[in-house]
Image (cartoon, helix red, strand yellow):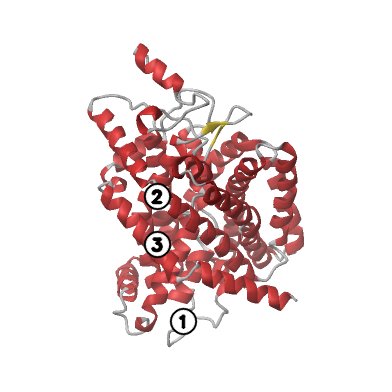
């Protein structure tokens, strides 16, 4: 029975993550980048300012909290184990394609987030709610597609994806301390329960503290290894670029696999186009949707260009990886998918000593903890959407989520990753289709923002000018203060 389940999961994963989705992710990011004249590059300075800007009301979370919450959600095992498995199946060239999907995917992140902000509502608890389900229903005006996304957002982050994160904690702690996976599973469930029962504001406050700490700690490890092997760095970059285009004889036969795995793991890691980031970002307070769009484009950079590159440098500079499908295995003959996180741990131990493996185990806890917080809120927001804010449905889902978290230490490694990919890919299909249908709105939002900035204003959003209804008066306060000249 279990073998049948494994076969079904892997088969479904192959269908969802066919080349069609890979090309759709790349094409959507490139199309939006060109139509908006690459705002992810042009407005980089503006992006940095907005991340630390202070909110003007207390109805939502701050831009920095939103940034940290989405970075916390994005930065997880996709950035460590995901990079390792991308290299295993696609060769070092997969890292280049991860960079590509981040650079052009930042435009997708801007668009989906700006739309989520433009169509957000005020929830019964006084906190903003929104995301693809909302902008698809009200913008695309095709509720079945909105429902399909909401269902996948519950099954993806809420049920299928937590296992990847928790299994990584169990693997690293077992390797570093010999701890029982079951014990680790129980402790993780207890800690995450303490946070998720506090709602989005508690989640964002915890993420505001943990996200910067984990990124800086991991960056320090990567920088030390990089500078210690500085003479090898040019060779590593040459290997990445040559492998990406099939110029390297060793990896030339798997160039298509490099693209597929680079994009697949890139989307899993940075979530650009997946539709999960906008769910949290819709809770943020800002005077114009484009502001939060630029903030979330910045979080994609942190995730992939910074943290994923750190993992790639740690793994490639120390040679602590293995490649499937290429002649000449490198280092130990380890099974690929099951040992993604352990490659990074092995690399750090080989360079720093045994203590580094234990430190990484602690860092992994923070990575996983922030990811699980993000996953929970993404799923809960869609439970609330489908159940029309039912408290009973929300409470039942919390229990289901905690069971899913614990199940991560019980399920086979490969199945866990396949389940995570299904959740990620399913959301991406529905979100990108909906986003592209009303991409004109996202483009107009950016033009309006830039026009107001050019006129010397702090941009304020007027939904009526875009044909968007605002039944809750979400933007009324900003418009009133704009007229009074107090904003």
Residue 91: horizontal and vertical position, in percent?
Answer: 42, 75
Labels 2 and 3 touching (C-beta < 8 A):
no
Which of 18 and 104 lies nearest the eye of the viewer? 18
Secondary-structure class at tag 1: loop
Q: In the rendering, which numbered label is found on residue 330?
A: 1
Work out how far the residue at label 2 is from the one at label 3, CA to CA, in angstroms: 13 Å
Q: Name the residue: 37% across, 81% down.
A: 251
- The image quadrant that residue 252 belongs to is bottom left
Q: Which of marks 2 and 3 is in front?
A: 2
Q: Which comes before the other along the chain, label 1 or label 2? A: 1
Residue highlighted by disc 2:
437
Q: Earlier in the sequence, mark 2 or mark 3?
A: 3
User: Mark 2, residues whose alpha carbon is within 10 Å: few (<14), some, or many (≥20)?
Assistant: few
Residue 426 placement (x, y as % from top left): 54, 60
Q: Disc 3 or disc 1, which is closer to the eye?
A: 3
Image quadrant containing the C terminus: top left
Residue 7 visible to the viewer: yes
Residue under the image location 66 percent in, 36 percent down: 389
């Amino acid at each position: 029975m279990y073998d049948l389940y494994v076969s079904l999961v892997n088969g479904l994963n192959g269908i969802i993550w066919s080349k069609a989705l890979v090309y759709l992710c790349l094409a959507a990011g490139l199309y939006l980048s060109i139509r908006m004249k690459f705002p992810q590059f042009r407005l980089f300075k503006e992006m940095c300012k907005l991340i630390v800007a202070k909110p003007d009301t207390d109805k939502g979370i701050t831009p920095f909290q939103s940034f940290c919450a989405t970075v916390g959600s994005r930065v997880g095992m996709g950035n460590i184990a995901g990079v390792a498995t991308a290299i295993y199946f696609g060769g070092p060239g997969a890292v280049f394609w991860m960079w590509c999907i981040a650079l052009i995917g930042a435009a997708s992140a801007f668009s989906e987030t700006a739309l989520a902000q433009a169509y957000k509502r005020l929830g019964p608890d006084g906190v903003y709610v929104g995301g693809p389900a909302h902008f698809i229903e009200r913008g695309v005006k095709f509720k079945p597609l909105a429902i399909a996304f909401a269902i996948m957002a519950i099954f993806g982050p809420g049920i299928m994806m937590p296992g990847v994160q928790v299994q990584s904690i169990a693997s690293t702690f077992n390797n570093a301390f010999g701890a029982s996976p079951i014990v680790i599973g129980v402790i993780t469930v207890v800690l995450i329960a303490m946070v998720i029962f506090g709602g989005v504001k508690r989640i964002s406050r915890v993420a505001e503290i943990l996200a910067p700490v984990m990124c800086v700690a991991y960056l320090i490890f990567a920088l030390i290894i990089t500078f210690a092997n500085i003479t090898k760095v040019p060779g590593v970059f040459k290997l990445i670029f040559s492998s990406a285009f099939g110029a390297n004889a060793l990896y030339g036969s798997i160039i298509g696999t490099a693209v597929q795995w680079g994009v697949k793991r890139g989307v899993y890691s940075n979530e650009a186009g997946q539709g999960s980031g906008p769910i949290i970002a819709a809770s943020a307070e800002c005077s114009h949707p484009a502001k939060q769009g630029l903030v979330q484009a910045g979080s994609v950079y942190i995730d992939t260009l910074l943290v994923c590159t750190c993992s790639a440098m740690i793994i490639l500079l120390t040679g602590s990886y293995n490649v499937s499908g290429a002649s000449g295995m490198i280092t130990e003959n380890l099974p690929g998918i099951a040992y993604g996180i352990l490659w990074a741990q092995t690399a750090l131990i080989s360079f720093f000593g045994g203590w580094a493996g234990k430190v990484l185990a602690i860092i992994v806890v923070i990575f996983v903890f922030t990811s699980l917080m993000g996953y929970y809120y993404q799923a809960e927001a869609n439970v609330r959407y489908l159940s029309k804010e039912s408290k009973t449905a929300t409470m039942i889902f919390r229990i289901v989520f905690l069971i899913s978290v614990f199940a991560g230490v019980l399920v086979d490694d490969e199945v866990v990753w396949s389940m995570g990919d299904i959740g990620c890919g399913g959301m991406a299909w529905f979100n990108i289709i909906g986003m592209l249908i009303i991409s004109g709105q996202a483009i107009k939002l950016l033009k309006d923002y830039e026009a107001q900035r050019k006129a010397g204003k702090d941009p304020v959003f007027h939904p009526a000018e875009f044909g968007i209804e605002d039944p809750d008066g979400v933007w009324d306060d900003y418009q009133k203060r704009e007229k009074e000249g107090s904003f």
